[in-house]
Image (cartoon, rainbow, N blue to C red):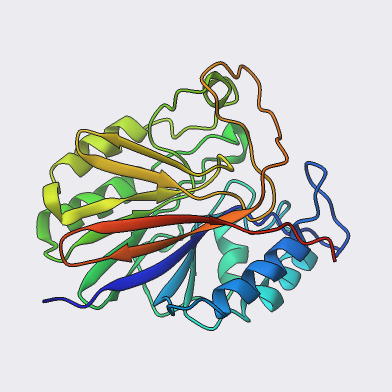
Amino acid sequence: MSEPVYFVHISDTHIGPTADYERHGFRPLPCAARLVEIINQLPTKPDFVIHTGDVVTEPHPDSYKTAAELLAKISVPTYYAVGNHDTAVELQQYMTFGAHELLSETLLSYRFDVKGQRFLVLDGRAPDERDPEGWISPEQMEIVQDEIDHGTMPLTLFIHFPLLTLNSPWLLHNRMLTTNGEALHQRLLVAGARLNGVFFGHIHQHSQVVRDGILYTSAASTFSQFSGWPGDEEPQFPASPPGYSFVQLLQDQMVIQPHSFARSVD
């Protein structure tokens, strides 16, 4: 019997260049600091933390230095996906990653293994002129295909952007989706039961979508949420609390536990 793997899924910290920086009416930094405390005090220690992007709001050295200093306090290995507010170069320059194998010379696409499980992180950041939509390069499509063709371990994917259309019109109107996400979905179908699921961020809300037997799930932002109702033509910014997810990969099932916590104002 394989050992269980536990990890914490966080996303969209949007740390700014100063401690008093605000976005959507809230200060990201105190919330991120509180979350670091929570992670380090969890009753079950995770094997790692995955941050699915938008570590900062603007890729400025002061923002990354602040984020790096804070998130380095997490007591387990931490991994990062590139958000539309990040750059691959600066994430690698400033942030501390757990052990991993880079799969691209130009993109932050990599893999790592934990207790017989394979984790694949894709860089879905599109060129600047296409922001905020996501895009999977041909190189990364081949990386995924190679893993599907030759990999044997249970597989989990991490990316910042949602691959599929969600039932909130504003996500489509505001170009929040991955333009070729459907093509990646079709490739993933071949992985079958090997694929645990796809974890993403970007939409500032917890969600679970199952299509063709594949689970797609996002984590709440660590400081501010977006609305996601079917009738929302434009994004709303409810005063919902920040959150994260605790994920358990077990022998024959996966358990995802969304958690929220009080927004820190210190």
How many labels were placed on the picture?
0
Residue at 61%, 31% in the rendered image:
227
Residue at 16%, 76% in the rendered image:
2
Q: Is residue 40 left or right of residue 109?
A: right
Q: Is residue 94 visible?
A: no
- Residue 53, given in percent of the width and then of the height, sits at 55, 54
Q: Locate the C terminus and report the quarter of the image it occupies.
A: bottom right
129, 148: nearer the viewer: 148
- Residue 39, given in percent of the width and then of the height, sits at 55, 73
Residue at 54%, 32% in the rendered image:
176
Residue at 63%, 36% in the rendered image:
226
Q: Is residue 189 left or right of residue 175?
A: left
Where residue 194 sits, quadrant-wise, is bottom left
156, 263: nearer the viewer: 263
169 versus 95 height, above or below: above
Where residue 264 sits, quadrant-wise, is bottom right
- Residue 136, given in percent of the width and then of the height, sits at 39, 42
- Residue 255, given in percent of the width and then of the height, sits at 32, 58
78, 64: nearer the viewer: 78
Q: Is residue 63 left or right of residue 123?
A: right
Q: Is residue 261 visible?
A: yes
124 versus 7 height, above or below: above
Q: Locate the N terminus and report the quarter of the image it occupies.
A: bottom left
Q: Is residue 75 left or right of residue 239?
A: left
16 versus 136 height, above or below: below
